[in-house]
Amino acid sequence: MIISKTGIQHKITPARIGRALWSLVRGVIIIGICFTILQPLFVKLSVSFMSEQDLLDSAVKYIPKHFTLGNYKLALKGMDYWNSLSRTFLLSAGVALLQLCSCMLTAYGFARFRFPFKKLLFGCVILMLIVPPQIIMLPLYMHFRFFDVFGLIKAFNHGNPISLLKTYWPFVIQAATCTGFKNGLFIYMLRQFFKGMPRELEEAAFMDGCNKFRTFIRIILPSSVPMMVTIFLFGFVWQWLDSFYTSMYLAQMQSKVIPVALDSLAASVYKEYNNFGGSMNFVSPGFVSMMNNTGTILAIVPLIILYIICQRYFVEGIERSGIVG
Amino acid sequence: MKNKKGYFKIVQGKWRLSLVGREALAGLLFASPFLIGFFFLFLPMVIKSISFSFSNMTVEQNGYVLTKAAKNGFEHYIRALTIDPDFNRQLLESVVSMFTKVPIILIFSFFTANLLNQKFHGRTVARSILFLPVILTSGVVLGLESSDLLLSTLSPAELSGTDFSTILNVSGLLLKYTDLPASAINFLANAVNGIYGIIIASGVQILIFLAGLQSISPSLYEASSMEGATAWENFWKITFPMISPLILVNSIYTIIDSFTSGSNEMMKMIKNTIFGEVKYGLGSAKAWIYFICIGVILLIVGGIISRHVFYNDER
C-alpha cells in the first residue's frame, strides 16, 4: 500500500509498476541525452581553467589540479575580446534586423497577395533554401571583391571597381535582399505564420480605408511580435557564430569579429609569445586546445545568456511557425 | 493568357490597374526585396558559378578573365571525376554516410519527440537542453570542435566507442550469439558510437516532430480508446499517419543539413580546392557535381516518401 500526499490509498497493481518502471527508463534516457549534449560544454569549461601541465597529466580528467585564469587573460587579449564583442554585436544585430524586415515583407507578399508567377517565384525561395551556399561562394567573393552596379561605380571611380571585402557592406547587401544565411528558411517560416493569421482584421482595416502597407504596419506587425523576436534571435545567433561568410569577407580585417578571432586565436596568441621570448618554436596541441576551448567559452557565453533569457522564443518559435500545418 | 484575369482595365480611354492588378502590384512590391536579391544577386551568382566551372580563371587587378577550359569546357569535370584521387571516394563516402545517418536521425528525433510529448517533471528543461545544439554547435564552434585533438579524446562519442569495443564488445557478442547479419550489427554499432553527432544534428527535427505531435487532436485518441484500441495500435493508426507529412519535411531538412553543414568532408574539400589550392574552375566543377548528386537524391527520397504520406485534410 502506498499512501500519497493527498491521503488516498493506492494499491500496487501491475499497471502501476509498469508505469513507474517506464518513467524510470524515460528519466534515464532523457538524462543521458542531456548529459551527452552538456558534457562537451563542461569539458570546455574545465579545460579553460586548466594549466598546460594538467592537460598532460593523465590523472586529471575534468577537475583542474592547477586552477588558473591565465587562459582567459591570454584569450581575452588574443581575441581583443571586448572590442570584437561589440563589433560582433553590432554586426549580428544589424544583419538580423535588416533581414527580418526584408524577409517579413517578402513573406507577407507571398502569403497574402495573388500575383503572376507566384508559385514559380516561391519555388525560387525553396531553391535558395536547398542550394548550398558553398556553390556560390566563389562568385560571391569575386562579386564583392570587384563590386560594381551596372557600371556605375566604375564610372565614378576612375574605371576601377571597388572592393567591399573587409567591410560590412556585403552583409548589409545580402541581408537587405534576402540572400543572406538561411534567409530562405526565414521566408518560409514567416509565410506559413502569416498564412495562419485570420484575414478578417486586414479586411476590416481595408474597409476603413487603410492601404496595404499601412495595414501591414498597423495590423500585422503588432500581432506577430513573438514570431519576429524568434526570427530575429535565430538570425542573430547564426550570424554570431557564422564562420562561412565572415571568413570569406572579413578574414584579413584588422578589427576582427568573434568567429574570425576565434578561428585564429591560438595562432595569434602564439605569435605574441614568440615575440616575447622566442623560445617556443612549435605550437603544442595542448596549448591550441586550451586556447580554443577558452575562446569558445568566451564566444558562446553571450549566446548562452541570451538563450536563457529568451529561450521560450527559440523553442516555441518553430512550433508557432506552422511548419507543421 | 494572363490578361484574362484582368490586371488592367480601360477607364476613359486610359489603361488603369484593376483591383486584381493592384493586388498583384502590391504583392510584387512586398516581395521586391527577395525578387531583387534573387534576380540580381543569387541567380547571377549561380550562373557565374556554372560558367566558372567550364572555364579557367585568371585574377587580375581590376577583375578576372575567363578563358574556355579544354575539352569543350568539360576539363574540370573530367578531371574531378577521373583524375582527382580523392573526389570520387569522398563523394561516395558522403552519400553513404548520409544514407546511414539520416534514418538514424529521423528515428532518434521521432523517438525523442514522443518522449518529450509525455508529461513529466522538468520537461521544459529537457526541451531547452535538447535545443541547445541548434544554437551552439554551428559555424565556427563545430569547426573548432572537429579539429581539436584533445577534445576528441574526451568527447562522449570517443568514450562510448572505446568502452563498447574494448570492455563490453557488444557488437562481437551480437555477432557470436545472434543471427543478425553483420551489416545490421555494424549499422547499430556505428549509430551507438556516433550518438553525439546524431544528437546534435537532430535539434530542429525533434522540435518539428514535437509540434506535430502536439497538434494531433486528443479526441482522436479518446475515440479510439473507447473502441478498445491499445496504445500500440493508437501509435500506428493515429500518430504515425498524422505525423507522416512531417517525416517528409524532416527527411528533406536532414538530408540538406547533412550535406551542407560546414563539417561535411566534401564541403571542406571544395572550400580547400577553391581557396587553399586556388583552383577556381576545378572547385566550382566539384561543387556542381556534388550539388547535382544532392538534387537527385532529394528528388528520389522526396518522391518515395511523399507517395506514402497521409494528408488529413486533403488539400
Image: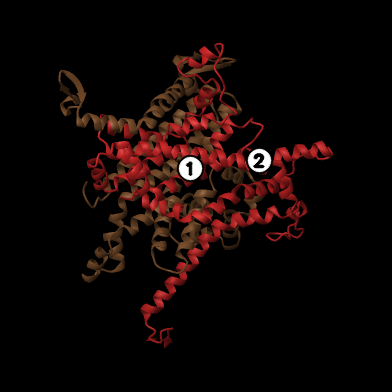
Chain colours: A red, B brown
- In the image, B19 versus A297, the foreground residue is B19
Please tell me in which quadrant of the rendered image residue B13 appears.
top left
Residue furthest front as drawn: A208
Q: Secondary structure at mark 1?
A: helix
Tell me, for residue A83, which label it has, or none.
2
Residue B81 appears anywhere in the view: no
Marks 2/1 same chain: yes
Position of residue A249 measured from the top left corner of the image (x, y, whole percent): 57, 30
Residue A38 can be seen in this image? yes
Amino acid under disc 1: Gly
Between the C-alphas of marks 2 and 1, the distance is: 21 Å
Q: Relative to the observer, which residue lies in front, B302 or B242?
A: B242
Q: Does residue A80 appear to the left or right of A242 in the view shown?
A: right
Q: Please report the residue visible at 17 percent of the width from the left and 27 percent of the height from the top.
A: B6
Disc 1 sits on a residue from what chain? Answer: A
**Location of the N terminus of chain A (image quadrant):** bottom left
Name the residue tied to disc 1: A235
